Image (cartoon, rainbow, N blue to C red):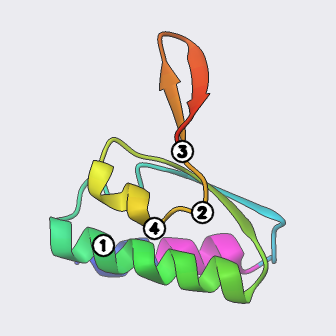
Amino acid sequence: SGGQQQRVAIARALANRPALLIADEPTGQLDAETGLAVMELLRAVVRSENVTALVATHDPQLLGLADRVLELSDGHIVEQA
């Protein structure tokens, strides 16, 4: 399934213990429930492994999982409160 493939991709990306994990639309091809589960897994893993994750998404439902949200608007980065 797509969710399982995303979980495997996250595991592969973390195998070498990077300091930074970049994920571009990691839930873009998943249904809302599976996407949320994948993002919760990613959040738990990056916290337990002390990894910084930079996640690009168009899904506003995922913003609540972030410690910090930056928005790219008209070519400018804007931090959301």
Residue 47 percent coordinates (x, y): 68, 81
Is residue 6 left or right of 80 when viewed as pictured? left
20 is higher (above) or lower (below) than 13: above
Q: Residues within 10 Å of mark 1 (few under 14, many from 20)?
A: some
The amino acid beneath tag 3 is Ala
Q: In the orientation shown, which residue stands out farthest toward the top? A: 74
**Which residue is the site of mark 3?**
81
Specify the segment rendered in magenta.
8-15
Magenta stretch prevailing secondary structure? helix
**Which residue is the site of mark 2?**
67
Q: Secondary structure at mark 3?
A: loop
| Viewport quadrant of the C terminus | top right
Q: Residue at x 22, y 63 (%)?
A: 30
Looking at marks 1 and 4 on the same chain, the residue that comes earlier in the sequence is marked by 1
- Is 14 within the magenta? yes
Q: Residues within 10 Å of mark 2 (few under 14, many from 20)?
A: few
Q: Residue at x 54, y 76 (%)?
A: 43
Residue 55 or 24: which is nearer the viewer? Answer: 55
* Front: mark 3 or 4: 3
Could you tell me how far apart the alpha carbons at marks 2 and 3 are, in whole angstroms?
11 Å
- Is 9 within the magenta? yes
37 is higher (above) or lower (below) than 63: below
Q: Secondary structure at mark 2?
A: loop
Looking at marks 3 and 4 on the same chain, the residue that comes earlier in the sequence is marked by 4
Is residue 25 left or right of 9 when viewed as pictured? left
Q: Which mark is residue 36?
A: 1
